[in-house]
Amino acid sequence: MEIVNAGGIHSVVVSMKAHAGHAGVQEQGCAVLTNLACDDESETAIAGAGGIQVVLTAMMAHAGHAGVQEHGCGTLGNLAENADNRVAIARAGGIGLVVTAMQAHAGRAKVQEQGCSALSNLAANSDNKTAIADAEGVRVVVAAMQAHAGHAGIQEEGCGVLFNMGRSDTRLQKSIKDQGGVGVVEAAVVVLVSNGPCTMQARALLRKLASV
């Protein structure tokens, strides 16, 4: 990508560090990094340039700014497509920040969708599944799916989180079931009826939850 090759990642990170107190710069910086994190090479480059930490710093400094939280979660979600980044984000406290963002902006659909997307990708790591559960991640995802029942994006990403967490861990399956996971996934199947892959995934999760 031309922007990456021209040093764009470094420039964005430097700008975000220099204007850490300016919410607009942080929001737009996160938005740019989200768009640049489109393949494994760029995801690795962003992490190597300090992009993970600068996004987490922005989210901590501007916890009440929905735009920063939305795009911060978006960046973390895209970066978490990379296995090493999943570990790095979790170690730096990213899971807790995503959950906090979703709790603080429960009525903002875009924050909920991007937060669920980030947790879904982070949950592809086995250690992260437990960390998400310990951070009240299941509860916040179920709450998002209940509050935004007609929002297809939130239903899809929410199912993704719950499926990745409950894929093979019976303890987590029980936790999902106990926190209302069955009801929200059943409702999501109706909303996502035209989305074959997602409904197949949701039905597979329901079968697992029925067995615990």
Image: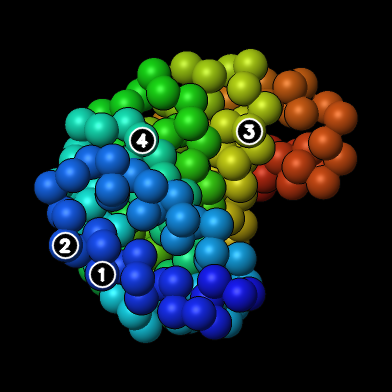
For label 3, the crowd category at 10 Å Cα-Cα, with few meaning under 14, some 14 to 19 and many 20 or more, is many
* Residue found at x 53% / y 66%: 37
Q: Position of residue 164 (x, y in %)?
A: 58, 55
Element type where label 1 sits in the image:
helix
Q: To which residue does mark 1 refer?
A: 14
Disc number lying in front (1 or 3): 1
- Residue in front for this viewpoint, 80 or 208: 80
Element type where label 3 sits in the image:
helix
- At label 2, the amino acid type is Ala
Q: To which residue does mark 3 refer?
A: 153
Disc number lying in front (4 or 2): 2
Element type where label 4 sits in the image:
helix
- Residue in front for this viewpoint, 167 or 93: 93
Circle 1/circle 3 CB separation < 8 Å: no
Circle 4/circle 2 CB separation < 8 Å: no
Cα separation between marks 2 and 1: 6 Å
- Residue in front for this viewpoint, 166 or 69: 69
Q: Position of residue 132 (x, y in %)?
A: 36, 53
For marks 4 and 3, the one nearer the N-term is 4
For marks 4 and 2, the one nearer the N-term is 2
**Which image quarter is the N terminus in?**
bottom right
Circle 3/circle 2 CB separation < 8 Å: no
- At label 4, the amino acid type is Gly
Q: From this view, report whether residue 23 is shown above or below residue 125.
A: above
Q: To which residue does mark 4 refer?
A: 67
